[in-house]
Image: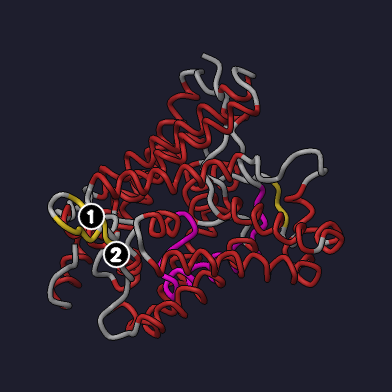
Amino acid sequence: MNAPFFKFDYFGEETSLIVAFIIGIGFGFFLERAGFGSGRKLAAQFYLTDLTVFKVMFTAVITAMVGLFWLSVLGLVDLSLVYVSNTFLVPQIVGGLILGVGFVIGGYCPGTSCVAASTGKYDGMIYLLGIIAGIFAFGEAFPLLKDFYTSTAMGKVTLPQLFGISYGLVVFLVILMALGGFVGAEWVEKKFSVKSGGVRK
Amino acid sequence: MKTLTLNGPVDDTAEAVHDRIEQPAARYWNPYVAGIGLGLVLLASFVIMGRGLGASGAFTSLVSVGVNAVAPEHATSNGFFSEYLGDGKHNPLKDWLVFEVLGVIVGGFFSGILAHRVKGTVEKGERISTGKRFLLAFLGGGIMGFGAKLARGCTSGQALTGGALLSLGSWAFMLSVFAGGYAVAYFFRRQWQ
């Protein structure tokens, strides 16, 4: 097996769009199954009454991370051909903080708002219009932001490179951290749901 | 709208049809099960395409095409929009992320239908009016759109995808998202409680 398939020309650009659509269906399906079409459920992450966002996100991250790690160890996937975006450390931290604020105020992130809108949430539809306005504003302000946007450019940096330890060890540490996080999340949920008189589920 | 049938007029507006066939919404899946499903979709994307998932990029393509339609010179002279418009030989909407996001909309709808969760509602707490919720939804979306562009991706492209690929910028981004959210959550509690 030579993977990623697309990089080995198993199929072309046109077919890749069909693949995109099918992968998107899977993505949207599981987002909705997790309850991510509901702004209340998503926002509850930030009030500690329902930590589903954390649990789903980190379960997904470790599932894909571990899967990719073993496929590359077995020589089935060429890890160097999987696209890792470049790090621009400070703009990404500032962008993340801004995004977190938008998450609490708006109740969604871009992917989940698509699911909210398609399952009939009117606020999700309006949120989508907000995203469009925000991206337009960023584009218009781009000449002013460009210097900051391209600052602290570090190229492709991964955690194994940063810490100078093996890929496998980082994978192991991330799993440990996530498992610890899950135990903590269950404990926090219990504590805060009692306080606020039960979790909405 | 009323339709005449043998049994007399039937109200067939969307709500009326919905009320007739309404069944209680199913429970959401266990978060760890849904997370594994999501992770396998992401893994499939890595293996098949050599890239991860995304969302905000699709909207950037859409915005760029819109700006280009209204003011082509303005769009091409802007370094941000012009990058998404490309060389002009390809339709910027024939883009991987655009098709992926169309799939997300369909997949979410499909799951919602199966679980009897597709319903015209507004997600908000009891203490805030619908008008205010709409205003905050628009504002939050705007802030999110702006932040996502500064960070070069959102929860899907950076946190999920970059997180699984152990990218430094993505992990810094992910922690910042939670930090930003928790920092302001207190001030917006009325919206959700």
- In the picture, the quarter occupied by the C terminus of chain A is bottom left
The chain identifier of the residue carrying mark 1 reads: B
Q: Secondary structure at mark 2?
A: helix
Q: Is residue A163 magenta?
A: no
Considering the whole magenta stretch, tell me its main secondary structure: helix
Task: Report the front residue among B102 and A179.
Answer: B102
Residue drawn 43% across the image and 79% down it: B184
- Identified at 20% across, 58% down, the residue is B10
Can residue B187 be seen? yes
Between residue B52 and residue A180, name the one nearer to us.
Answer: B52
Between circles 2 and 1, the one closer to the viewer is 1
Residue at image point 24% right, 44% down:
B114
User: Is A17 rendered above or below residue A30?
Assistant: above
Chain of the residue under the numbered disc 2 shown in the image: A
Quarter of the figure with residue B149: bottom right
- The percent coordinates of residue B71 (x first, y second) are 81, 63
In the image, what residue type sits under mark 1?
A: Leu
Residues at marks 2 and 1, CA–CA distance in whole angstroms: 41 Å
Q: Is residue B152 left or right of residue A153?
A: left
- From the top left corner, tell me how far across and down residue B151 is, in percent: 61, 60
User: Is A12 drawn above or below residue A137 in the view shown?
Assistant: above
**Residue B4: which numbered mark, if any?**
1
Quick check: marks 2 and 1 in contact, CB under 8 Å? no
- Taking depth in this image into account, of A64 and A7 the one nearest to the observer is A7
The residue segment tinted magenta is A86-111
Check disc 1: other Cα within 10 Å, few if <14, some if 14-19, many if 20+.
Answer: few
Task: Where is residue A140? Give x, y as percent.
Answer: 75, 69
Marks 2 & 1 on one chain: no
- Identified by mark 2, the residue type is Lys
